[in-house]
């Protein structure tokens, strides 16, 4: 371009450069229109996924195990954003290349290229288990038609195709005019694309799931709750002649206090130690890990059913209403992601409300040899664990509540599995829709062929919350060293810290509800000036103490002592 400018040339290269730029701009704009159309359709129809999201899911599903294992191990928010942005950029760049073909008169290449994009998008969207196949294909192909059409239109409007018609007969001003016009039209296409994204987002109304959550509460609010505490006495309106056995079943046993009661009087370190993780992780602060891109799966609780299938005597389905009518109980269970690094934050402690899985499986009648329970979500994600863990005394529950609320959509509304002592990737299926009984070798859950262990028992772990790395402290000023430790279902026996390798010092533990929950720990420290290294280790209820050996998250969970280095000012 600069050469041409200095020579005021009317040369073929200048034409070629110009048509190249025109084409690239046109194709990029056209691709943007296609992608924007996908976003518009996603907003207009609840079940149609965005094309970008669909392709993200496609790529993540087909990424080889090793790559997933070491670069995008379990999908966190940033990896998802990166992949999505990457797809948009690559699509627009390839659109630019197709546009160049158009500007050179090779229209067939352009049309064929965009058609391939449409097929890819349509297929990606259609294979999503929540979306309608025909509608997805229509959207994918329509997006391609719009993209190709916009590209050709911009090329024509900008006059870029004049190249083919009259190679020599154009002067420089016409060339720059073409480039300028193509830039103008491409910007228009970009604006149209953004407008479609905007309209799509605004059309994306409240889902049935969100409406339900807004209108309903897991627990009746305390003010409206009647004071009828003595339900057992009021129901015994029958004559005294009732058999002794019946009366005993009516009268509640002096059982262990409910989790709610225990929590109300629990001596946690929440208010005592500034900066420590709260004993119960609030829902909006609870980590989120799943393979769902774009909008979190929205499940209408009115349509939803949970199916029990496979090696069972009585396959059956259960509705959300039926589950709510069952005997619901609360359980404090720590959930962690296998990809949590030592000291990482992919761990949380919540009060899960639900029904024991054993009750539901007993109703289905588990057949002999069915030694694996596989949960499947509405978005076709799967996890499998040994049937034994349902019956070994730990809490393995179908949860519909999290911290006194129905499950938030991002945490699996309407129902999920929570199995104490297992990492989420082998157990904690969100947006659950099927529980399949099979043999151990009969099926591998989603992450298993991608390089993670088939069994995922949670390892004993501890984390330093305060002081945080690098934070300045003042010499002679007492400061807390505190954090959390967990080893579901074994419980935590002891937590110790080691400052500058001078020996292990015991820490005080906060109270916890049971051994499936994490514990908070704390110790005061009055540091001298200088740089200090703080390490932590926990000993679980089996007497196992975390070892120094560092192990990466893959394939079955990180190991090692969390270490924090701090500077203490004079
Ligand atoms: N449907 C579905 N459920 C899923 C996953 C998923 O990708 N899809 N990821 C699992 C993993 S790896 C973890 S660690 C937990 C995380 O649960 P949370 O997002 O509620 O913290 O969910 C599990 N359940
Ligand atoms: Mo995970």
Image (tube, helix red, strand yellow):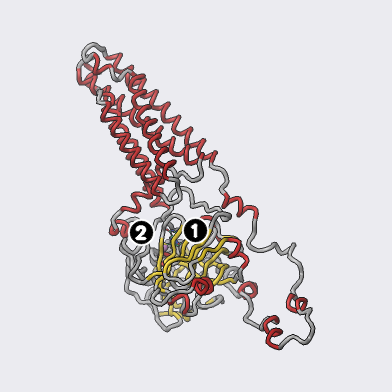
Nearer to me, 183 or 213:
213
Q: Is residue 211 above or below residue 225?
A: above
| Disc 1 CB within 8 Å of nearest ligand 1 atom | yes
Viewer-nearest residue: 58 or 470: 58
CB under 8 Å between discs 2 and 1: no
Position of residue 220 measured from the top left corner of the image (x, y, whole percent): 69, 63
What is the number of the mark on residue 73? 2
* Visible residue check, residue 342: yes
Q: Is label 1 in a helix, a strand or a loop? A: loop
Which residue is at 50% across, 36% downward? 198
In the image, residue 471 sits, relative to residue 132, either above or below, namely below
* Residue at x 35%, y 72% (from the top left corner): 440
Residue that numbered label 1 is attached to: 431
> Does residue 101 lie above or below 392 as drawn?
above
Q: CA distance from mark 2 to mark 1?
A: 21 Å
177 with respect to 285 (left or right): left
> Could one spot residue 345 in this view of the protein?
no
In the rendered image, residue 234, in percent from the top left (x then y), is placed at 77, 76
Across and down, in percent, residue 67 comes to 29, 56
Which element type, helix, strand or loop, lies under badge 2?
Answer: loop
Q: Residue at x 35, y 37 (%)?
A: 118
Q: Position of residue 133 (x, y in %)?
A: 42, 45
Residue at the outermost front position: 313
User: How many marks do you count on the picture?
Assistant: 2
The image quadrant of residue 68 is: bottom left
Where does the N terminus fall, quadrant-wise? top left
């Amino acid at each position: 371009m600069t050469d041409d400018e200095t020579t005021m040339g009317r040369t073929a290269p200048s034409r070629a450069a110009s048509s190249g730029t025109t084409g690239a701009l046109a194709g990029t704009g056209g691709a943007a229109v296609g992608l924007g159309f996908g976003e518009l359709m996603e907003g207009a129809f609840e079940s149609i996924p965005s094309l970008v999201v669909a392709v993200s899911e496609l790529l993540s599903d087909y990424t080889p195990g090793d790559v997933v294992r070491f670069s995008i191990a379990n999908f966190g928010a940033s990896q998802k954003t990166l992949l999505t942005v990457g797809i948009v950029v690559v699509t627009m760049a390839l659109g630019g290349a197709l546009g160049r073909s158009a500007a050179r008169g090779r229209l067939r290449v352009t049309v064929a290229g965009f058609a391939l994009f449409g097929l890819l998008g349509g297929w990606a969207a259609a294979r999503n288990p929540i979306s309608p196949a025909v509608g997805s294909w229509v959207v994918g192909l329509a997006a391609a038609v719009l993209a190709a059409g916009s590209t050709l239109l911009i090329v024509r409007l900008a006059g870029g195709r004049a190249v083919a018609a009259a190679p020599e007969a154009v002067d420089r001003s016409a060339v720059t005019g073409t480039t300028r016009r193509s830039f103008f039209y491409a910007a228009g296409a970009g604006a149209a694309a953004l407008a479609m994204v905007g309209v799509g987002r605004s059309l994306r109304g409240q889902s049935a799931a969100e409406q339900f959550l807004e209108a309903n509460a897991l627990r009746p609010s305390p003010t409206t709750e009647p004071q009828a505490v003595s339900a057992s006495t009021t129901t015994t309106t029958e004559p005294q002649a009732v058999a002794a056995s019946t009366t005993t079943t009516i009268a509640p046993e002096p059982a262990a206090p409910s989790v709610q009661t225990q929590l109300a009087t629990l001596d946690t370190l929440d208010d005592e130690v500034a900066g420590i993780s709260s004993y119960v992780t609030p829902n909006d602060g609870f980590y989120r890990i799943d393979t769902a891109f774009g909008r979190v799966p929205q499940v209408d609780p009115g349509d939803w059913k949970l199916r029990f299938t496979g090696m069972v005597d009585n396959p059956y389905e259960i509705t959300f209403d039926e589950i709510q009518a069952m005997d619901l109980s609360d359980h404090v269970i720590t959930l962690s992601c296998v990809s949590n690094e030592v000291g990482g934050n992919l761990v949380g402690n919540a009060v899960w409300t639900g029904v024991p899985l054993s009750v539901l499986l007993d109703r289905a009648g588990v057949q002999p040899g069915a030694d694996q329970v596989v949960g499947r979500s509405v978005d076709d994600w799967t996890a499998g664990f040994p049937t034994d863990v349902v019956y070994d005394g730990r809490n393995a529950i179908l949860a519909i509540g999290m911290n006194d609320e129905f499950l938030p959509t991002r945490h699996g509304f309407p129902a999920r599995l929570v199995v104490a002592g297992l990492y989420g990737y082998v157990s904690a299926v969100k947006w659950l829709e099927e529980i399949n009984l099979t043999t151990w070798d009969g099926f591998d859950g989603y992450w298993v062929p991608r390089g993670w262990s088939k069994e995922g028992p949670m390892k004993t772990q501890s984390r330093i919350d305060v002081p945080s790395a690098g934070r300045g402290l003042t010499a002679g000023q007492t400061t807390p060293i505190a954090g959390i430790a967990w080893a579901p279902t074994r419980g935590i026996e002891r937590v110790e810290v080691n400052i500058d390798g001078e020996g292990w010092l015991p820490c005080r533990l906060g109270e916890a509800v049971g051994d499936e929950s994490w514990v908070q720990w704390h110790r005061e420290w009055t540091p001298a000036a200088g740089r200090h290294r703080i390490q932590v280790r926990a000993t679980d209820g089996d007497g196992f103490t975390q070892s120094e050996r560092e192990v990466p998250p893959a394939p079955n969970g990180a190991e090692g002592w969390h270490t924090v280095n701090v500077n203490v000012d004079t």
